[in-house]
Image: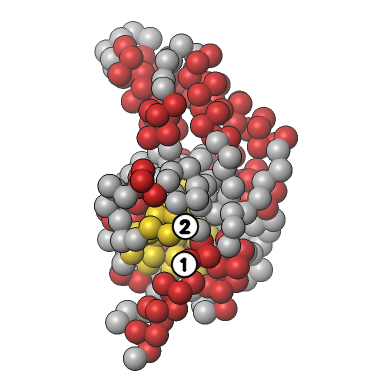
Amino acid sequence: MSPIKLVVFDMAGTTVQDKKEVETCFARACAETGLQVSEERILALQGYSKIEVFRLLWEERIGQSHPEYNENVVYSYDYFRMILEDHYKASDVFPTDGCVEIFDYLRKNNIKIALTTGFYRKVTNIILEKLGWLDGLDLNYLNISGKSMIDVSVASDEVQKGRPEPYMIQKAMKLLGVADPYDVLNIGDTPSDLKSGVRAGCRLSLGVTNGTHSHDQLKFIRNDGLITSLKELKPIVENIIVLNEA
């Protein structure tokens, strides 16, 4: 049995409390830039790179061949960025239930911690700085100092394509020197989180159901288990460690 070397976590909704802030900001940006999108549709697109979402929505609305397609995509995305940045600059940010405890446990067992996100780098850094998780990371957002809460941060604008593609997980693995995806666990709260872990070939791609999506919303998405909070991750990791030592 191969050891666990890395656990990859999503940010908003998985390790960072999300009380529908992203949905609210996104819905406002859509409404104020001419996109009529239902709450259900917005929820279904959580976790995906937002620039890709606006491309999809405007394609559905007017088609890529429309002369104003590119202009509309940029306008909606820039408007969303403004709203989102203002929100996080003005708001308190908190880790989810059990997050700090599982981070401590993983560090004590020499298991690396990566955070991936559908956010772009500027918003990612606003959130990380408010949590104190930016401390100790270098310019590549690597924990070479050994003093950070996490070992690496990867944002969606730092890879060729965001979720559900596996590129953020693969970049985290490369930066941390983890070659085999079977040595990696992936944890997220959206369908796109789960899909990216499956596509990356992670040993387990687990869904947490106290974030943006419920158990009923995630149970039909391919996964290796659903947990109610990050508090339930420790015994899963412990069991794999025991099997590895047997």
In the figure, 123 relative to 110: above or below?
Answer: above
Circle on res. 30: none
Residue 115: x, y in percent? 50, 55
The residue located at (40%, 29%) in the rendering is: 40
First in sequence: mark 1 vs mark 2 = 2
Q: Considering the numbered disc 1 on the image, is that residue within a helix, a strand or a loop? A: helix
Q: Is residue 78 visible?
A: no
In the figure, 139 relative to 185: above or below?
Answer: above
Residue 245: x, y in percent? 38, 89
Residue, disc 1: 233
Residue 221: x, y in percent? 29, 48
Q: Quadrant of residue 246?
A: bottom left
Q: For the image shown, how many numbered marks are present on the structure?
A: 2
Crowding near the residue tagged with mark 1, few <14, some 14–19, many ≥20 C-alpha atoms within 10 Å: some
In the figure, 2 relative to 224: above or below?
Answer: below
> Label 1 sits on what residue type?
Leu
Crowding near the residue tagged with mark 2, few <14, some 14–19, many ≥20 C-alpha atoms within 10 Å: some
The residue located at (50%, 50%) in the rendering is: 210
The residue located at (66%, 62%) in the rendering is: 136
Residue, disc 2: 228
Q: Quadrant of the N terminus?
A: bottom left
The residue located at (30%, 56%) in the rendering is: 223
Whole-Å distance between the Cαs marked 1 and 2? 9 Å
Q: Nearer the viewer, residue 166 or 236?
A: 236
